Every structure is written in C-alpha cells, then in structure tokens.
Image (cartoon, rainbow, N blue to C red):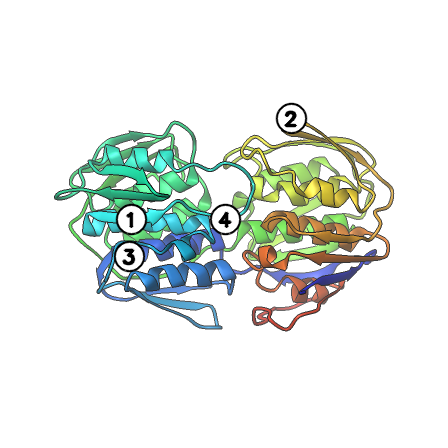
Amino acid sequence: MATIKIHGGYRLAGTVRVDGAKNAVLPIMAASLLAETGETCIEEVPYLTDIENLADVVRSLGARAELSHNGSLKLSAERLTTTTAPYELVRKMRASFWVAGPLLARTGHFRVPLPGGCNIGERPVDQHIKGFEALGAHVAIEHGYVEGYVKDRLRGARVYLDIVSVGATINTMMAATLAEGQTLIENAAKEPEIVDLANYLNAMGAKVRGAGTDVIRIEGVKCLHGAAHTVIPDRIEAGTYMLAAAITRGDVFVEGAIYNHLSSLCAKLREAGVTVEDDISGIRVRADGPLHPIDVKTLPHPGFPTDLQAQMLALLTTIEGVSIVTETLYENRFLHVAELRRMGVDVKLEGRSAIVEGVSNLTGARVNATDLRAGAALVLAGLAANGETVVTGLEHLDRGYGDLVSKLRQLGGYIVRTDEAQPPLRLVTAN
C-alpha cells in the first residue's frame, strides 16, 4: 500500500512554484471537443490522475489527446466517433460530465453517465440540464445515463441558474458558444477558472463576455477551431502551500500564486496573525508570531473556497482558543475530522459547523485520506505534529497534487512517499 510518512515539527522555509490549475485544465479539455478544425495545445498542465482520466474520456469519443511530461497537452477533436461516454471512465470523476455541453452543441447529441468523484456530498446535475433545456435541448435521465439531443441547432436563451454552480456555468457556457443568437447566463459562478475557460473559448473563435461576473453573455458562432492556451496557476495548490507555511510557523514564498484569486484566504490568514505579502510573482507567507483563533465560512467565489476548508481547519487545530468553520456548500465535507481526531484534535461537529478547540501539540498517527482536500489537510497536520504520521488513501491526493511530497521536502519537511508510482518531479527552487 502506498503511504506518505511524515516526521513533524519542522519549520518550512523557501520557495515553491505552483502548477497550472487542474480546475482550469479540465473544462478546457472538454471544450476542445467543440473544435471542428485545428489542434489545441494547453501549456502548464499538471501531471495528475484527473487529467489522465479526462484524457481517456475524450479519447473514447474519438479525439486525440497527448500529455507530455513537460506540462504540454495536445488535443484534436476533428473526427469524433461517438457521443456516448463510457461509464467506467465517467464514474471516476465528476468533471467528465463537462463533455456533455460540447457534444450537444457540436453534434446535437450526448449520452453521459451520471458522474462520480469525491464523496463530499450531493452534487446533482439538474442545473446543467436546466441550461441545456433552456437552449432548446430535450434531456432525459434513464438507466443511470443523462441523454440530450436537439434536432437542428441550439438556440440562444436567458438562463437563470437557481444556485451558483461552477459546473453548470461551465457546461451552459460551452454549449451556448455554438447556439444561434445570444445567451445570457444569470447568477453565474465567478471563479477564476471560468474566466480562464472564457479566454480559451474566445481564442477558439467564440464570443464570450462577462466571465468573472454573475452575468455571462455569449454570442453564438457557427464553428470553433483549436487554439493555444496557457492555464492560470492553481489557486488551491497555492493555498495549500500557504497554509503549510502557517501550520509549521514557517516562511514560504509561493511562486505563481495570484493574490486576487486568493484574497479571502489572505484575509483570514492575516486575521489569524499570519503575515501575508503580495508580490508581482507570488505570495509570501510568514508565521513567526502568536496566532489567533478565527471563524471561517465557505462561500462561492470570491468567498472562502470550500477546497481549502479542510486545510484551514487543520491550521486552526494548532491555534489555542476556539475557532468555528462553517461549510455551506457540501454536506459531507467534514469527513477529515474523524481522521484528525486520531492526532489529538478537539473538534465537535454541529450541523454544518465544526467547533475547533486548538491544542498545543498534535501527535502523529496513522490516518486515511477520504477525499482529495482531506488528504491535503492530513499531510499539513502531519507536518505540525509530534512524531510520525502515516497517510494512506493516496489515490485521492494524486488527483490534485502532482509533486506534493517533493515540494514539501524541498521546503524542509521530513516527508517521504513509499511507492515508486508517483507523477514525475518538476519542482523548482527552494531557499
């Protein structure tokens, strides 16, 4: 069994560079199915199992996808052979459902299984379906598959999303690029990854305006082509290293981190007493004084990211006093609490809130990652704990962190991975 072993209690210091954003690459890969001509080349692509899994999905549809170890991904979808995505691939990750919008817009049909992914709570596709139907598609769910079709061409429409949904915003936006007329997506998600997708779609020949606001306008075009694009840095990976610096009371410069993408995290770290310095090429985090308990509530962007909630909770367990973490987006996103308790953490769950009583010392223990971000939280806790921590369930971590162990080791962490089946190491510098 693959494990990560950590001897905690060492202060992290140095420079670490973040990879391109997984959550930007995945929708861009799906959007490449819209291109009837030309090749797409995506740069700064992290080497992750999620990327490989979606590459397998687009290959199964007849597209070509070649991922190199230098962070370059080439895709071509000139000759699609099917509009049905295989269950055995889609069940692995929720992002696979993003192929539905491009297939519907380009071919008039899709048949995609209900998606899988991390067990963090219900994430229905009803808002995706609402967007497709507003554009003129007929959609049905039968035998575990979502199937949609349109006789001729999708038609532009006003689409109001009942909840702020990143996935539904992405799928509706992609479908609308080839719809006849104008589409307005209201109550749209504002994440930086959506802005990055819009920039890529426009490079393909689409006409998308307003991404990053709650109203996105798309003027449909007749066809799209492949394009070159460099993805934005991964704000969740960046945030994880920022929190790693804080939990070890270290001093780390996170190269590539964009302050505007992480303003809510920066604000909360400062509130806790951490020094956060914005620089043109990244963010420096330094925790060399006493820290204070704080309250955190996850919200859609630009609020505090749910994907950093577990890591923030791990930090708060090391700050004496009472902190409260409230999760508003997913009902099962406190599964890491049970594992953290093995390390001496005092956390009580009340509904969607975790009441954290900080302790003076965490203790190393054997713990299991229940999902991607929970795994990151356990690694961070292990870095701060006395003694040895052993983390299992690494298949979750491999979905979102390509070089986690080597990057933390170069920052001074005493951490090692026991198996050899790791993504290739592309680490930059450490001071």
Instruction: Indicate which disc, 4 or 1, sits on the residue closer to the N terminus.
Output: 1
Q: What x and y, as percent, mark residue 427?
A: 61, 68
Q: Is residue 198 visible?
A: no
Element under disc 4:
loop
For the point 78% across and 50% down, the residue is 249
Q: What amino acid type should be assigned to the residue bearing mark 3?
A: Leu
Q: Is residue 257 left or right of residue 153?
A: right
Instruction: Indicate which disc, 2 or 4, sits on the residue closer to the N terminus.
Output: 4
Q: What amino acid type should be assigned to the residue bearing mark 1?
A: Arg
Badge 2 local density, few (<14 within 10 Å), some, or many (20+)? few
Query: Distance of mark 2 from mark 4, alpha carbons?
Result: 23 Å
Q: Quadrant of residue 162?
A: top left
Q: What amino acid type should be assigned to the residue bearing mark 4?
A: Gly
Write down the residue under mark 4.
117
Between label 1 and label 2, give the one nearer the viewer: 1
For the point 35% across and 54% down, the residue is 30
